[in-house]
Image (spheres, rainbow, N blue to C red):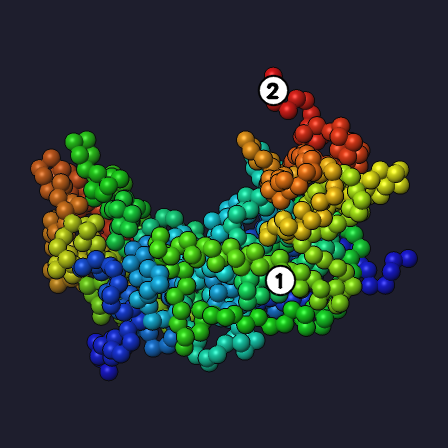
Amino acid sequence: MIETGLRLMTGGEAVAEAMRQIDPDVVPVYPITPQTPIIQTFAKFVANGRAHSEIVNVESEHSAMSAAIGAALAGARTMTATSSQGLALMAEVVYIAAAMRAPIVMALGNRALSGPINIHCDHSDSMLIRDSGVVQLFAENAQEAYDLTVLAPRLAEHPDVLLPVLVCQDGFTITHSAEPVELLEDEDVAEFTGDYAAPHPVLDTARPTTQGPFAMPDFYFELRRQQACALEFGLEALTELATEYEVLSGRGYGPLEAYRLDDAERAIVALGSSAGTIKDVVDELRDEGEPVGLLKIVSFRPFPAERAAALLREVGSVIVLDRADSPGGAAPLHAELAAALYGSGSELHGHVYGLGGRDLHPEDIRRIFAGEAERYVGLRGAACPA
Amino acid sequence: MSRLKTLVRNEAGVPQLGGGHALCQGCGVPLVVRTVLNTFTKPVVVVNATGCLEVATTRFPATAWNVPWLHVAFENAAAVASGVESAQRALRRRHALPMEEEVAVVVFSGDGGTYDIGLQALSGALERGHRLLFVCYDNEGYMNTGIQRSGATPFGASTTTSPSGEASFGKAQQRKDMTAIAVAHHVPYAAQATASHWHDLSAKVERAAAAGGPAFLNVLTDCPVGWGHEPRVSLHVLNAAVDSLFWPLYEVVDGRYRLTYQPDTVVPIEDWLRSQKRFAHLLRPEHAAVVEEIQRRVDADWEGLLRRCQGGDPT
């Protein structure tokens, strides 16, 4: 029998439930697989009077993020959702949302970028906006997608952060897979989230502000640095909020999660749902006497470099798994770890896996830990044509 | 109180768009902005697309605006305004706004941000029925980036990307009929106006603001630099656009067309062309056929408009 309080639902449904409980003011949305179940489920909640948001059914993702900026800066708590090409189309405006300090919460169902067109998971969409200045938190499963979504508005709206927060969940693997999820009580979420009071709402006509002005070389650099500082502060804000959230939910979060890293000699570093598979393999290998562990990165942006380096200090061999490639250069997560671990004495290895939804099997992870895996895990044929 | 007195009274004190901005001498854009904003009796929020108006009025840390002003990008002003308008409804519902009075959402965009790159976002906003006023200051080209041709640039005009030359008479395509495109969205109010006919423009703003849904104003606005005329003759040039029937002044209320101005004397299209350097090449004998074609189009469009105003089929 299932434990009381657990309900079977997909990651997409769990996030829609979080949105219902948060009950944001404005939700501009545009459909795209695999995100669509989120907005469909949420639209049904609104249609049935269980949430009260203004849903703006825009004509593109570019307009979804643009309307979200308008709404958030007007003073409304604003949420949206997208995937892949949708994020690529809105990328221009994602950068501006961060620069205008618009605290928008966005659910991202991670999906490979075209081409060829593909609907399944990898992290190339997230990496496309790596440097946009938004917070990116990666969930391992439906429960985490729910919890991080409940946490997200407070993080986005923190007066020293005021930035968009993306809660990333692997397309299909999390968005469409049903798992037991424990929801908080509606009242508890409402109390935790509170009401949003924007610091300088555009709709305050008694105190008019000019938002989104033209900045030349005499000011642009300073404004960009202020924005970056706000993102850097996000690590501290997330840690504080996660502590508060743990009291409420009994579930602990942080910018990263160390799994059996104590006295580990080899450790994998990874993002997203693969962490769940890796944990199982770590358990098996530990049972077999292998000193292995996992460092799961929850907050890819801001990246917890110092804490990652501290946790990996005693680990002789660090293996980074990237679910996105950077053709002609280092894969994104690998590059972060190389910077964080520079001079530490740990060996660093990197693999790219799972592009376009290719599965990562437990056997692959065993081969990775054993140092027997190819650089491109699961790729058929030679890495480059002869 | 007369309309002129109202406009003057609203301009006194703290003008919504103050002086000291960097728009060119003779530019029609601030004239349009001030006529539009001075007509409003309720508070406004301005959403601005990227362009001359945005660049010249908000160089950080200075601003020329005394009303709330929001700029995000070039192509998305209508989408941003959709968000502001939706936020107002949501916040009003949970009593989270400081003021009782409804705030009007007014968008200012050039023709690039309306006819071309901003068309999709505008179409979406019009279709969704947001209560906002979208004002296109149509100066018939990308003036901020250096006078390139746009979908609003008229047939035969020389621009930096449709230059006239030995093998070119300038732009070889007709301009879009953006007002008709707006009307096709079944909006409650759409109109053509111009900066020189301030009374007509102000009256249209008033009706647009009362329309209860999306309203679109297409305002022909001079650009002395891009059009090639002296700053002091701006309004005369715009008068020629109206009097030659190149830019008829009309409105469409719930699909019903109405002329709002009938020139006493219709002047030949050459009067409009002659007033600007961008058309100077057309007045050479070798381009007489191009001028004839422009006149023929203007006449045909006018006939179509008159038929629409009589409730008939425009074709």
Residue matched to label 1: A237
Q: How many marks?
A: 2
Q: Which disc is residue A94 wearing?
A: none
Relative depth, front residue between A22 and B105: A22
Which residue is farthest bottom? Answer: B1
Residue ID at (31%, 71%): B16
Asked if marks 2 and 1 touch (Cβ < 8 Å), the reply is no
Label 1, secondary structure: give it. helix
Q: Disc 2 marks which residue?
A: A385
Q: Tell if the residue under mark 2 belongs to the same chain as the one under mark 1.
A: yes
- Tag nearer the camera, 2 or 1: 1
Of callouts 2 and 1, which one flags the residue occurring earlier in the amino acid sequence?
1
- Name the outermost residue toward the top: A386
Q: Residue furthest right?
A: A1
Q: Chain of mark 2?
A: A
Rendering coords of residue A190 (x, y %): 67, 71
Left/right of residue B190 with respect to residue A342 in the rendered view: left
Look at the image and tell me whether residue B238 can be seen. yes
Q: Residues within 10 Å of mark 2 (few under 14, many from 20)?
A: few
What is the CA distance from the residue labelled 2 to the residue labelled 1? 47 Å
Query: In terms of depth relative to the viewer, which is nearer, B147 or A290?
Result: A290
Answer yes or no: is residue B178 visible.
no
> Which residue corresponds to the image point at 80% horizontal and 44% vertical from the top-left?
A263
